Image (cartoon, rainbow, N blue to C red):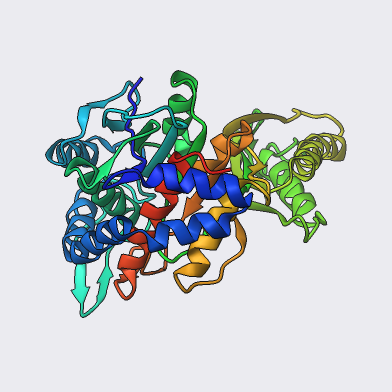
Amino acid sequence: MLIVTLVTVYGHVADAVRAASDASGGPSDVVRTLLDNPRTNQARQQLRQAEPSTIDTQVSLCEIAAPPFREAARGRAVAALFTDADLARVRVDAVGNVLGELPAHGRGPHVVISAHLDTVFPPGTDATVRRQGSTLRGPGIGDDCRGLAVLVALAKVAGAGLVTTDGPVTFVATVGEEGLGDLRGVRYLFDHMDGIARFISLDGGGLSVVSRAVGSLRYKVTFSGPGGHSYGSFGMANPIHAMGRAIDAISEFRVPADPKTTFNVGRVGGGTSVNAIAADAWMEIDLRSSDRAALEDLDRRFHGAVDKAVADENTRWGGRSPVSATVERTGMRPTGRTPDDDPLLRTTLALTLALGESVGPAEGSTDANVAMSRGIPAVTLGAGGISRGAHSPDESFTTAGSALGTERALLVLVAAAAGTR
């Protein structure tokens, strides 16, 4: 188990935060304690002054390609930065997560803070970051090179002794957050590390606070049959026609707007020639909802649509050379939420407001899904600045106000690790 601990800034801020929380039962006194403490403010000033270096880190990491399942090179760079920041026991685990730790100085709760290494872009994508004034452009520059850069900035503050420790906190750069990575890095972390009490993910720009996990189910469905000549074998069941029936049925699904529930057939393929009845065809589908029951209902309807499409196609041709369908699940992200009255969420929202930004709890699909699904309080924080065009080659990040995201991340981490109630 690798644990990084971080609670007090220049001394015993954690004790004051806990005392404020105990006295008030709410986040307002905790926020006041953090923002009025001169040593906390010195640490914030240090982060503000270091923001140009944080931006440089963001760019340098982003120019190291990290395609799906190929995050190792970027991971090595983060490991080197963790080492330079004087984190102890820096290492890479069995699936590629990068971890480092600081010694604990108390018995506070174990907090994990993370950002993800991977992007959605395939091998060969040009990873060059272009600077246009205060705007940076490049694939992954916001999602999640920004989160990684802020994670490193916090590690530097801790390693330099500006932050000392009370309860354990683990710094982690995870693999497999995007797409078919299926949260494999954070799943491995929770399966192999005991005692995680709170989880903070840094993902993208802005100052959003995600506390509701959008779950997803992803499938590849393959329709198969003997195939044949389009003229000579006419009259046999056709896998592509069966797939078309399934897609038509899915397109007519009615889903609730609240909780938001969605479906999408994202890719299709199959066949060999315009004059051949295909021997196989396939489609990939994504089902999503923040509500477990709604997602399960959509899942049942999807399976029913596939079964009916196959049956209807075989009936249409009298059972001649019937087709079949194989449904393979390719991804599953769990639903979950951090309750609106949870101290971690309440304090995070109060800190955000105190820093001049009013936000409410948002939905998202992030590494925090795993923590929320296991009943562990978790939030995903936007890491400052302005992100646009995520998952596009022309993704951009504008640095205006970016330091505020770094400061907030520190304050939320301090409050979480201090065990506020």
Quarter of the image that includes the N terminus: top left
Residue nearest the observer in this picture, 167 or 299: 167
Q: Position of residue 31 (x, y in %)?
A: 49, 59
Q: Position of residue 339 (x, y in %)?
A: 68, 46
- Which residue shows up at 24% across the image and 77% down it? 134
Asked which quadrant contains residue 88, the reply is top left
Quarter of the image that includes the C terminus: top right
Q: Is residue 252 visible?
A: yes
Q: Position of residue 354 (x, y in %)?
A: 49, 68
Q: Is residue 276 visible?
A: no
**Image-based side of 147 in relation to 221, left or right:** left
**Image-based side of 299 in relation to 212, left or right:** right
**In the rendered view, would you say 384 is above or below 89?**
below
**Image-based side of 167 in relation to 165, left or right:** right
Farthest residue to the left: give it. Answer: 84
Residue nearest the observer in this picture, 249 or 297: 297
- Which residue shows up at 26% across the image and 47% down it? 10
- Which residue shows up at 80% across the image and 37% down it? 300
- Which residue shows up at 87% across the image and 33% down it? 318
Q: Position of residue 281 (x, y in %)?
A: 60, 39
Asked which quadrant contains residue 383, the reply is bottom left
Residue nearest the observer in this picture, 101 or 262: 101
**In the rendered view, would you say 142 is above or below 92?**
below
Residue nearest the observer in this picture, 376 or 158: 158
- Number of marks in the rendered image: 0
